Image (cartoon, coloured by chain):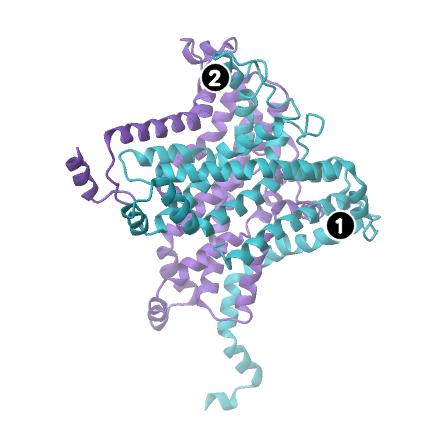
Chain colours: A cyan, B purple
Amino acid sequence: MISRTEPAWKRVWRQSAPHRAGYAFILPVLILFLLFRVWPTIDGLLLSFQDYRIRGGTTWIGFANFRDLWDDKIFWGSLQVTLTYALISVPLATVVAVAMALLIDRAIAGIAWYRAIYFLPYITSFVMISVIWSWIYRTNDGLLNGLLGTVGIAPIPWLTDERYVLPSLAIMAVWKGVGYSMMILLAGLRAIPATLAEASAVDGATGAQTFWRITLPLLKPVLFFVIVIETIGSFQVFDAIYVMTGGGPVRASYSLVYMLYDESFKFQNYGYAAAIGVVLFAMTFTVTMIQRLMFGRGEA
Amino acid sequence: MSAIAVSEAGQPAQDGRPSAPVSRTKRILLYTALTLLAVAMAMPFVAMLLMAFRPDDVTALRDIFFSTSFTLDNFRANLRNDSMLRWFLNSTIYAVVSVVLVLVLSSLAGYAFAKKRFFARDKIFWLFIAMLVVPAQVTIIPLFILIVKMDGANTYWGLILPTVANAQGVFLMRQYIIGIPDDLIEAAKLDGASEFRVFWQIILPLTVPVQATLGIFVFLWHWNDFLWPLIVAQQSAMQTLTVGLATMQSLVPSTNSMMAAAAISFLPSLVIFIICQRFIVQSIASSGIKG
């Protein structure tokens, strides 16, 4: 009865009530998300085609930034540094994390304590541990060379030699981050039915055979997730380099993100730096897509 | 020997899978490996603390570990440093305000994405998830330009607001709230509860565990964050502790004093870790939340 006398706009208003309620709940986060996440992503792409001046006078320059990158030896150097760093840190982190997950995957007295200690570095900031490891790695009066000296090993220039700087940074990053990957892998190990390993033991398989033939194949999706996370993280290496090496010695640790920081916030070449950002995005996107194609929709 | 091992194996494990029967030698080897690894993992922390409590003139390795001289001067000097206190305050504001905002915003949106039907709901949710692929470093230049144009450089809101629309938080909340039975919501509505009341009195109390998980991680992300505070809050009085620490390090100070500063910067995270250790570690396995 009421609906017949009700004007059309009122009906629409009433029927849209659930929609309005839904939008009222998501609106605060949606506005912030569009403004501070979606728009900057689009703008980052636009910037890479501009000669951007923060005080006005911006011009569109097409692919000039990318052409300049192509001819820029420093850019290729930073790409090489980033990929070398990934090539060192990702396998190292993965192997250590698997070993540690296997080690703590048992219910024995005190295991929670060990797990907590292994995990502890993960909650630190890169800046704080870089401060500590700057001292550990110092050539003349550093902790590590001091310890090695007691067994007669000559001082090693951990951070000041082009050959050692990336492995040194990678070791520190593995120390900091391994607790996270370890926990993810541990969850993966626990999801494998214990009966499988028992059956293979009954069939006379050694521990190593069980690991390579049963555990590892079943762990593959989780393992791949960890590798992807580690790879993406290694592409973004910055904080430790900023504090410990400043990109040196002689640009031996001058990573992509460090170059992005340098070009934008030191030299105000915002468009050029945005082009580096596009390259970084392409690298991250490729790795993520490979994971999606191989294992479908992995969790988060 | 084997009888003991079997009876042990039969006991339900307190944590994880039941332990397989192990011989005593294996057990000793296992604990040796675990302990050696623990020493290696803890060594940087131990060295930091030892160095922080030693006077400046203790530099020889043996003295750092075994000297009897002990001082609080390094901590005192840091805590008397007004800049240090200001940075600590700034980091606290950055982390705590962000935690509150992320929790409020994420649970509001997570509830709507989980339980409400509205136009383009799933497409909008997909947008949140899809944006996770874009690294923060990629958006940092446009974001900086935007904040500068909005006059937000060197302000708290300019530092905080761009970081609180957290897609991981929205995702986590939605996944959790989806598991809450619809009957509870319907019953409250039949009793005449308003939309907001349903959220406030039914949904929020049930999400306390996931709020705690997300809250801890958001705190750690912000407390440890570096690149964004570095570029958007460049004035010394507005810098966060991580940025301040990096600045101090670049001035080549005494190692002892730097170790004390590092220890101070770690204290809040450590306290949270000690209180919520089991909780933090388990939530990684169950939710895959990533810092």
Residue A102 lies, in percent from the top left, at 38, 39
Please tell me in which quadrant of the rendered image residue A169 appears: top right
Q: Residue at x 66, y 55 (%)?
A: A39
Type of the residue with mark 1: Ser
Q: Is residue B77 visible?
A: no
Between A197 and A21, which is closer to the camera in this rendering?
A: A197
Q: Count neighbours of disc 2 (C-alpha within 10 A) and say few if under 14, some if 14 to 19, many if 20 or more.
A: many
Q: Label 2 belongs to which residue?
A: B51
Q: Chain of mark 2?
A: B
Residue B121 lies, in percent from the top left, at 53, 67
- Count the numbered circles shown: 2
Q: Chain of mark 1?
A: A
Secondary element at image label 1:
loop
Q: Which label belongs to residue A1?
A: none
Using the numbered discs, state the Cα–Cα distance from disc 2 to disc 1 in whole angstroms. 47 Å
Q: Residue at x 52, y 36 (%)?
A: A92
Is B210 on the left-hand or right-hand side of A272?
A: left
Above or below, comparing residue A257 to residue A278 in the picture: above
Residue B283 lies, in percent from the top left, at 39, 47
Q: Is residue A100 visible?
A: yes
Type of the residue with mark 2: Met
Please tell me in which quadrant of the rendered image residue B189 appears: bottom left
Secondary element at image label 2:
helix
Above or below, comparing residue A244 to residue A10 in the picture: above
Residue A162 lies, in percent from the top left, at 66, 26
Q: Label 1 belongs to which residue?
A: A48
Q: Residue at x 68, y 39 (%)?
A: A256
Is B80 on the left-hand or right-hand side of B19?
A: right
